[in-house]
Image (spheres, grey):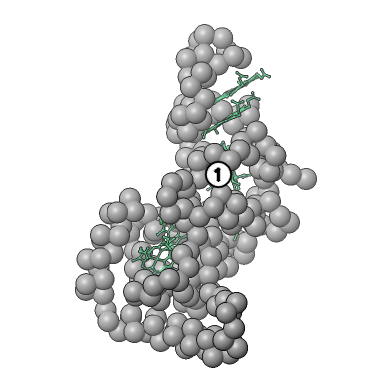
Amino acid sequence: MNCRSYSVFCRRAAICSFAVCLFILAEVLPEVGGAAQSGNGGAGYIRTPVYTEEGVEACLSCHYGETMQAIAASPHGNVTNPATPYSTKGCESCHGPGSFHVSRAHGGKGLPQLLSFGHGPGRSSRQEQLGACLACHENERSGSPMIGFTHSVHDLSSINCSRCHVVHTQTDPNSDASRQAGICLACHRKQKDGHPLIGRKPVDFGAMTCSTCHDVHPPSK
Ligand code: HEC
Ligand code: HEC
Ligand code: HEC
Ligand code: HEC
Ligand code: HEC
Ligand code: HEC
């Protein structure tokens, strides 16, 4: 998905309205320059990225593929709920403040990456990934469903939220009865041919989901 969306981006970049790019640059440069000036030039001086003013629109001007649009139709894109990402910082609610990223995308080198979810090289640390989601989902914040992931059976170094959840989609596969078991059984192979409760008889997981019986991360009080 990444490669495809980036190559689409590249093609788009070629025809990208130069005016839009200049506009974004104009937004970013004064702030970087201003930071450099106001710093006293000490070796320990660190510039801090800020949230973009344009929010989602700034991001979609480059990341405009279907996957990126899908999130608007998901619960996270629900603007009638004031606690959702789309009612707050948009894409940056999860990926972090994007002012430097936008200038990095224009060729700026050595600037920090945005939060990158998932597993493998180039991904952000597990703690950063969990922190981005749990800031809303494990703290008191009315409007966000509360969960109790920390210290649950799946709070293991090899497992983060995106091992089970997909957010760049209209419907998370866990809330789809026909798809949830597939996610669980990818790791719980033993349960595939015979769940201990039901004996050898295979369960119709299309009708009954695993989470009907297993509260994977029960809500914290
Ligand atoms: C000017 C085009 C452009 C804009 C605007 C833009 N991006 Fe990107 N983005 C890119 C390119 C190109 C890459 C991949 C190359 C790279 O690693 O820098 C990328 C990579 C990413 C990544 C992968 C991690 C990383 O930092 O490399 C994330 C996440 C991301 N963008 C999110 C966002 C968000 C959120 C916004 C809005 C604040 C945004 N992008 C705005 C062009 C853009
Ligand atoms: C609710 C949190 C959340 C929001 C809001 C969100 N993302 Fe993401 N983003 C993720 C996660 C998690 C992934 C990993 C793939 C997945 O789960 O779908 C991801 C993957 C990506 C990637 C793939 C880059 C990589 O790291 O390889 C890009 C680019 C990206 N998001 C950009 C955006 C843009 C642009 C928006 C706004 C339109 C946005 N995201 C909104 C959480 C979020
Ligand atoms: C800015 C706060 C915020 C952040 C950050 C956030 N969420 Fe949410 N999330 C919400 C709210 C609010 C809802 C409920 C939306 C509704 O139903 O109106 C929600 C709903 C959900 C749901 C249930 C809805 C569904 O899609 O089935 C899941 C799963 C979820 N979030 C996972 C995540 C993950 C994983 C991350 C990190 C990648 C994340 N969230 C980051 C606020 C947030
Ligand atoms: C082992 C798989 C797994 C992992 C890991 C996981 N989840 Fe879930 N999550 C589920 C399942 C299954 C559901 C229930 C879906 C349903 O029944 O609709 C769920 C539901 C949710 C909901 C909706 C709760 C509600 O009351 O509506 C949120 C929010 C959520 N998860 C966030 C997260 C976050 C944030 C992380 C990472 C810190 C995470 N999950 C890690 C499997 C997982
Ligand atoms: C990334 C792999 C992975 C995924 C995906 C996953 N699990 Fe797990 N699960 C584990 C590991 C590892 C453990 C802890 C070790 C063990 O008991 O097998 C565990 C433990 C459990 C336990 C407790 C077992 C016990 O002995 O107490 C249950 C129940 C469970 N998972 C259900 C689920 C359900 C339901 C889903 C899908 C929503 C799911 N798991 C998805 C890896 C996974
Ligand atoms: C009808 C309710 C029900 C459904 C549906 C269900 N489970 Fe279970 N599961 C149980 C019960 C009850 C146990 C036994 C708990 C025990 O032995 O302590 C169990 C045990 C487990 C264990 C621990 C087994 C072990 O070897 O110790 C895992 C892992 C597990 N289930 C995963 C799943 C997965 C994955 C799914 C979906 C594909 C699923 N379950 C569907 C009720 C259910």
Q: Which residue is mark 1?
A: 160
**Front in this rendered view, residue 122 or 199:** 122
Residue located 54% across and 39% down the image? 158
Say whether residue 34 is visible.
Answer: yes
Q: Position of residue 174 (x, y in %)?
A: 51, 38
The answer to whether 187 is drawn above or below residue 158 in the figure is: above
The answer to whether 214 is drawn above or below residue 7 in the figure is: above
Element assignment for label 1: loop
Identify the residue at the far top of this view: 200
Mark 1 neighbour class, 10 Å CA radius: few under 14, some 14 to 19, many 20 or more: many
The answer to whether 41 is drawn above or below residue 179 in the figure is: below
Q: Position of residue 129 (x, y in %)?
A: 55, 53
Query: Is label 1's Cβ within 8 Å of ligand 4?
Result: yes
Give the image quarter of residue 122: bottom left
Residue located 39% across and 59% down the image? 69
Give the image quarter of residue 152: top right
**Front in this rendered view, residue 135 or 75:** 135
Apparent side of residue 155 relative to residue 17 in the rendered image (left or right): right
Residue located 48% across and 22% down the image? 189
Question: Which of the four quarters of the rendered structure image does ligand 5 lie in?
Answer: top right
Query: How many numbered circles are shown?
Result: 1
Apparent side of residue 23 relative to residue 154 in the rendered image (left or right): left
Q: Position of residue 109 (x, y in %)?
A: 39, 72
Amino acid marked by disc 1: Asn
The answer to whether 206 is drawn above or below residue 36 in the figure is: above
Q: Position of residue 221 (x, y in %)?
A: 78, 45
Say whether residue 166 is visible.
Answer: no
Residue located 21% across and 73% down the image? 15
Identify the residue at the far front of this view: 43
